[in-house]
């Protein structure tokens, strides 16, 4: 519901939904639910352009997933933290976060997450001027997502291609 409200432009309702959902998840006392809620609220903050709040929420989500042993959730958070850190100019931190995401996504066999980690790692490398490392990361991720039929991942890849391969 939060994503729909945001994308339909009802930002006041989406803000209320984000706050109420997070408060309810915290009150519930179930860490898996809280971790998933933090992920969704972080995506909301990112989508409205509040990268700092999204980053803080993803940091909390990753810490909670580490605590409860949810490697998939932790990896989702790390992929998105790496992206956010790159946009905040924290390229070294972005790289470290994404290297961990690459390792954990490979470990658990999460091919889509691994491809998005490569997209984001390529972005961080590109922003630091390491074009030679960025280009094969983007190309490989794009090809892997196309091979598994991930239309959204392929579409996202076009924006990474436009940035990285065109320069």
Image: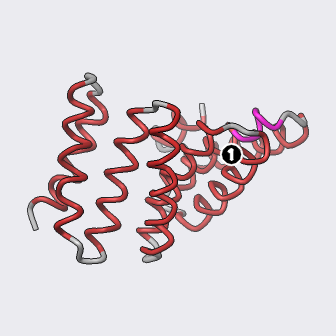
Mark 1, Cα crowd under 10 Å, few <14 / some 14-19 / many 20+, is many
Secondary structure under badge 1? helix
Residue 164, position as x, y percentages in the image: 18, 61
Q: Quadrant of residue 18?
A: top right
Q: Nearer the viewer, residue 20 or 94?
A: 94
Outermost residue on the top side: it is 149
Q: Quadrant of the C terminus?
A: bottom left
What residue do we see at 40% from left, 41% from top? 114
Q: Is residue 125 left or right of residue 110?
A: left
Magenta span of residues = 31-35
Q: Which residue is mark 1?
A: 38
Q: Nearer the viewer, residue 4 or 43?
A: 43
Q: Nearer the viewer, residue 45 or 111?
A: 111
What residue do we see at 72% from left, 54% from top? 63
Report the coloring of the rendering: secondary structure
Residue 58, position as x, y percentages in the image: 62, 54
Q: Nearer the viewer, residue 90 or 26?
A: 90
Q: Quadrant of residue 99?
A: bottom left
Q: Quadrant of residue 34?
A: top right
């Amino acid at each position: 519901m939060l994503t729909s409200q945001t994308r339909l432009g009802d930002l006041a309702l989406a803000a209320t939904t984000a706050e109420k959902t997070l408060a309810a998840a915290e009150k519930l006392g179930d860490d898996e639910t809280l971790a998933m809620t933090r992920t969704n609220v972080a995506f909301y903050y990112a989508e409205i352009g509040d990268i700092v709040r999204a980053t803080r929420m993803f940091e909390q989500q990753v810490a909670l997933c580490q605590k409860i042993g949810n490697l998939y959730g932790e990896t989702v958070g790390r992929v998105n933290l790496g992206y956010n850190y790159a946009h905040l100019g924290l390229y070294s931190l972005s790289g470290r976060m994404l290297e961990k995401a690459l390792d954990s996504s490979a470990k658990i066999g999460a091919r889509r997450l691994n491809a998005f980690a490569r997209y984001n790692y390529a972005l961080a490398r590109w922003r630091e001027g390491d074009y030679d490392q960025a280009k094969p990361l983007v190309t490989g991720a794009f090809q892997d997502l196309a091979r598994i039929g991930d239309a959204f991942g392929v579409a996202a890849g076009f924006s990474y291609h436009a940035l990285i391969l065109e320069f």
